Image (cartoon, helix red, strand yellow):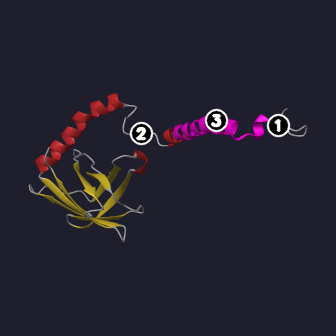
Amino acid sequence: MNNLGQNDKPKSWFKQFWPWFLIVLPLTAVVASLYTVKIAFENKDSLVKSNYYKEGLAINEELQEKQYATELGLTATADFQTEKQLVTVDLNSSKNSPLPKTLSLSLVHVVAANNDFAIPLVEIAPGHYQGSYDKPLEHRWYLQLTPLTVGNDKLWKLQTEINFNHRPVAEFTSTL
């Protein structure tokens, strides 16, 4: 005789635990992979330039700018007052070359190019410049100091890097 009574029918498959358990595992993997693809597209890697050929050609120009800064004997110090969001730059020339009235301090983020920005600096005293910014600064950045207006003069460039978590002061030297 059968143990099932007449009213005891087997449960439908969708009322059972194991079919749902077997469906949920691959479904979870699909959802997680779609979310990973979404994150990858939203946070594209900006380290590789699409115009790498033009960037490669510009290397010679950049080397000339650094060489000219070395010829002028330029050195600088950038002091960031992060609580006031103010930067002071002291620029010196060992060859007593005339210094520009305005400078541009570019902050290049080490990973995300969309965070890059430039701070215009105005001369407040001979060789002393000041500018303000509105972004909070932390971690590591690359810095580039160039004259804002050059007129007929040749362009020069000083570069260094800074880690705001350690010290908000950067030293620029004009060595290649």
Local crowd size for mark 1, using a 10 Å CA cut-off: few (<14), some (14–19), many (≥20): few
Kindly tell me whether residue 173 is visible in this rendering.
Answer: yes
User: Which residue in the rendered view is the most extreme toward the left?
Assistant: 95
Image check: 57 left or right of 3? left
Marks 1 and 2, the one that precedes in the sequence: 1
Q: Which mark is residue 45?
A: 2
Q: Position of residue 68 (x, y in %)?
A: 16, 44
Q: Nearer the viewer, residue 44 or 160?
A: 44
Question: Residues at badges 2 and 3 in contact (C-beta under 8 Å)?
Answer: no
Disc 1 marks a residue whose amino acid type is Asn
Marks 1 and 3, the one that precedes in the sequence: 1
Magenta region, residue range: 11-37
Q: Position of residue 82 (x, y in %)?
A: 34, 67
Residue at which label 1 appears: 3
State the residue at coordinates (33%, 48%).
110
Local crowd size for mark 2, using a 10 Å CA cut-off: few (<14), some (14–19), many (≥20): few
Kindly tell me whether residue 98 is visible in this rendering.
Answer: no
User: Which residue in the rendered view is the most extreme toward the top?
Assistant: 53
State the residue at coordinates (47%, 43%).
43
Mark-to-mark CA distance, 1 and 2: 65 Å
47 versus 57 height, above or below: below
Answer with the quarter of the image where residue 123 lies: bottom left
Tell me the quadrant of the picture where the N terminus can be found.
top right
Disc 2 marks a residue whose amino acid type is Asp
Q: Position of residue 158 (x, y in %)?
A: 21, 50
124 versus 7 height, above or below: below
Q: Is residue 23 on the magenta stretch? A: yes
State the residue at coordinates (25%, 35%).
59
Q: Which mark is residue 22?
A: 3
22 versus 131 height, above or below: above
